[in-house]
Image (tube, rainbow, N blue to C red):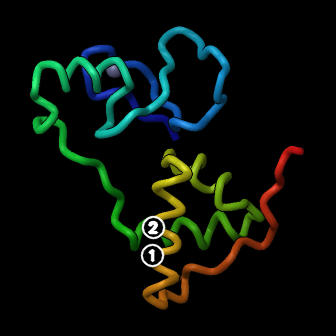
Amino acid sequence: MSTRCRGVCGAVLVPADSAAGVALPTGVRRKKARGLCGACYMASWRREDLAEHAVQQRPRDDVLDDWLVLRGEGLSLRQAAARLGMSFEAFERAFYRARGDGDERALPPLVSEVRCA
Ligand SMILES: [Zn+2]
């Protein structure tokens, strides 16, 4: 799933934590917030018109329904977040909030997160 920056650049956005420290191809930028890349976010902040870009939130119901499918495919939380085009932080927050509220769809991943040494 790819989304485009809602600012003037129109770049394809990838999650903020993807390919950290690696240069992205032309026309691809990391997502900052509010559906904007970092450059457009900062430009909007300087113009003081950030309020024109609504905060993007996926309804928790959608996130959890998607999680059940991706969990069944054996994806980790981090992989699921990337698949959904969400930052890991946003996905993790929604997941643990749902768990805290006793939502039975907030099941732990079938695989443990693979970590690099
Ligand atoms: Zn942009």
Q: Secondary structure at mark 2?
A: helix
Residue annotated with mark 1? 97
**Could you say where residue 12 lies in the image, as x and y percent from the top left?**
45, 24
Residue at x 53%, y 51% (from the top left corner): 84
Rendered location of residue 69, percent (x, y):
62, 68
**62 in relation to 81, above or below:** below
Measure how far apart labels 2 and 1 are at the Cα level: 5 Å
The x, y position of residue 58, in whole percent, is 36, 58
In the displayed structure, would residue 7 be above or below residue 87?
above
Specify whether 31 is left or right of 25: left
Towards the viewer: 9 or 100: 100
Amino acid type, callout 1: Arg
User: Which residue position holds label 2?
Assistant: 94
Q: Nearer the viewer, residue 90 or 82?
A: 90
Ligand 1, what quadrant?
Answer: top left
- Queried on whether the Cβ of the residue with tag 1 lies below 8 angstroms from ligand 1, the answer reads no
Q: Are marks 2 and 1 in contact (CB under 8 Å)?
A: yes
In which image quadrant can residue 104 be found? bottom right
Describe the element under mark 1 as helix, strand or loop: helix
